[in-house]
Amino acid sequence: MKSKKMKSEGTVAPTLEDVAREAGLSPMTVSRALNNPKIVRPMTVARVMLAVEKTGYIPNMLAGGLASRRSKLIAVVVPQINNNMFVDTIQAISDTLAQRGYHMLLCVGGYDSDGEAALVATLLSRKPDGIVLTGIHHAPALKKRLINAALPVVEIWDLTPTPIDMLVGFSHEKVGRLSARYLLGKGYRRFGLLWTADQRALIRKQGVVDMLQSHVGCWFVEVKVGLPATMRLGRDGMQALLARAPELDAIICSSDTLAQGAILEAQSQGISVPQQLAVMGFGDLDFAACHLPSITTVAIDRWRLGQEAATMLADKIEGMTLSEPLRDLGFWLCERQSA
Amino acid sequence: MKSKKMKSEGTVAPTLEDVAREAGLSPMTVSRALNNPKIVRPMTVARVMLAVEKTGYIPNMLAGGLASRRSKLIAVVVPQINNNMFVDTIQAISDTLAQRGYHMLLCVGGYDSDGEAALVATLLSRKPDGIVLTGIHHAPALKKRLINAALPVVEIWDLTPTPIDMLVGFSHEKVGRLSARYLLGKGYRRFGLLWTADQRALIRKQGVVDMLQSHVGCWFVEVKVGLPATMRLGRDGMQALLARAPELDAIICSSDTLAQGAILEAQSQGISVPQQLAVMGFGDLDFAACHLPSITTVAIDRWRLGQEAATMLADKIEGMTLSEPLRDLGFWLCERQSA
DNA sequence: TTGTACGCGTTATCAT
DNA sequence: ATGATAACGCGTACAA
């Protein structure tokens, strides 16, 4: 009897070795029975399960990950979560990953790319098997680190021909163009832009502006609001817009939340939407469809975005070859009452 | 020279040993310089930092956690995240933890306590240093496991004299009583309850019902809606209520989102709020204050809830003795236009 | 099908 | 202030 630890303390968690002793097997056989039962005799598996039950064994994935070099952990970095646009995607990622045996390490990094880089540096010490990044603008040092670590990466919520690794998103520029084209087609000419300053919103705005400027006889004014976009900011921004240019006939907002605020502010000033003023949002959040008036907006499949990102990651980690590492999920216009 | 690995591959991540070699020190000294610089001579620390820079070293917390038995990981279990009530709290937890050097493992467990138990079982294999649980109703087996693991636990969003370990929340029952008392005081007598079926909402409802039943000359009808609560469900539920009892004079909703839907539905039927019908919500979500009419509701400090939970956990993990493991954060009425 | 020897990268502990 | 050695608990690789 080698003078090994005598696990007589009630507080010490049982290990594989304890289970093995209980079952009269070697630790390795227990490990196999737990992780790959197919290659173990069924009766042996049963014996193991019994011993697991008896000992109350819980695997230690720190040890397992260290030995196998697979942590079954996915890091997800988002700029914020108290933003209705992101939560569905996060939940989809979490659900999809859980089904495949992964856990999600969620980090809120803000909209600053240096902060993100610092954050990811600490994340990497968890040795995640993969990482989900929001957007396509990252600090060069971060990109280098990720490529160097040969870590599967999915960038989401945006499009670029040159992703770090994989990508699933849609074209914000096209969303902007579509919104502007739609309103121009409806005959609106005097535009107000109510916009937040995050990177992706700015690209949508560029799309809007490009489209408007290529059209003669129309003009626009713009009001910027802070992050996160709230209904309050929508109302305040709308007030500022109307003060600046009372003759506006259409408002494009960078999100449905702002649009809702804008509509309310208009109504509170006795301006009827859409009769006197059209308002358009982005996101097709839950309330957009049943608001009064219902909000015309552009929808994307936030849930699917998360599903695909998680699936792509898990597939790549598990060695499947991806048909297409770049996915454009597209978007669609929701024509409703407000515009 | 023992025939140890020759790290000539470019793809192999550098380890403490590599850094030590580069700096001409032992791995242990490097480890100390990184984790506890105070006990290492400043010049030595500088040498280590240089070597870290040169090698691009990233610590491996799987190994570190295994050796030190501290993972610097906190597991957080919530029923859903696409619920505006929870996201602020989650973000607060994440932020607070990040500041103290912890990462957050976020799991969405649904409203089913057996599912939660299964989920936590897998979580425990990550050896988190602590865990945040939503609510106070958990499977007995889960409680036993947690107590057995001697893991610091904070239950949030609810109150009980007998938490598993620590707790920060508020009394849903009192919220319900306050809401009902307020409306009774305003003279309303014919109540409609628009309610979801999650555990905490049901306790609030019980508070409402108790208060109403102790008051002569008033009555109520009730409509149940599913989870998650959306504005759509608010509108549909309101429609059902009005169909059942057109003479209602006040509606109490289990959340602001439902209240918003209820108000809209009323307006769309030509019923003016609050002149003909009062509507009250719960949560004081962003839009409640600037809606038209602004929504009377009950607020709680969701952000602080998360901060306190995270701080309590980190304090306990780091050996500080807590003054009070039970925190009642309370709540307050927001009297606005809708009721 | 099952077992043995060893290494994963770090920290605790004791020694210097 | 720094170093040597032995865990930490598991999986890989190979042997039986």
Image (tube, coloured by chain):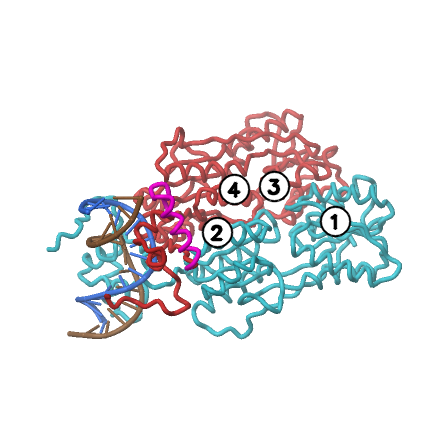
Chain colours: A cyan, B red, C blue, D brown
Separation of residues labelled 3 and 4 (CA atoms): 29 Å
Separation of residues labelled 4 and 2 (CA atoms): 17 Å
Q: Where residue B204 sits in the image (x, y, percent)?
A: 53, 35
Reading the chain from its start, which is encountered first: label 4 or label 2?
4
| Residue sitting at the far right | A217
Residue at which label 2 appears: B108
- Under mark 2, the amino acid is Val
Subunit bearing disc 3: B
The quadrant of the image that shows the C terminus of chain B is top right
Q: Report if residue B261 is visible in the image.
A: no
Separation of residues labelled 1 and 4 (CA atoms): 28 Å
Q: Nearer the viewer, mark 4 or mark 2?
A: 4
Separation of residues labelled 3 and 1 (CA atoms): 34 Å
Q: Using the image, tell me which numbered label, if any, was put on residue B194.
A: 3
Residue at which label 4 appears: B92
Q: Is residue B255 above or below residue A114?
A: above
Q: Which residues are magenta?
A: B35-55
Q: Nearer the viewer, residue B39 or B245?
A: B39
The answer to whether residue A137 is left or right of residue B137 is right
- Under mark 4, the amino acid is Ala
Q: Nearer the viewer, mark 1 or mark 2?
A: 1
Q: Quick check: marks 3 and 1 in contact, CB under 8 Å?
A: no
Q: Quick check: marks 1 and 2 in contact, CB under 8 Å?
A: no
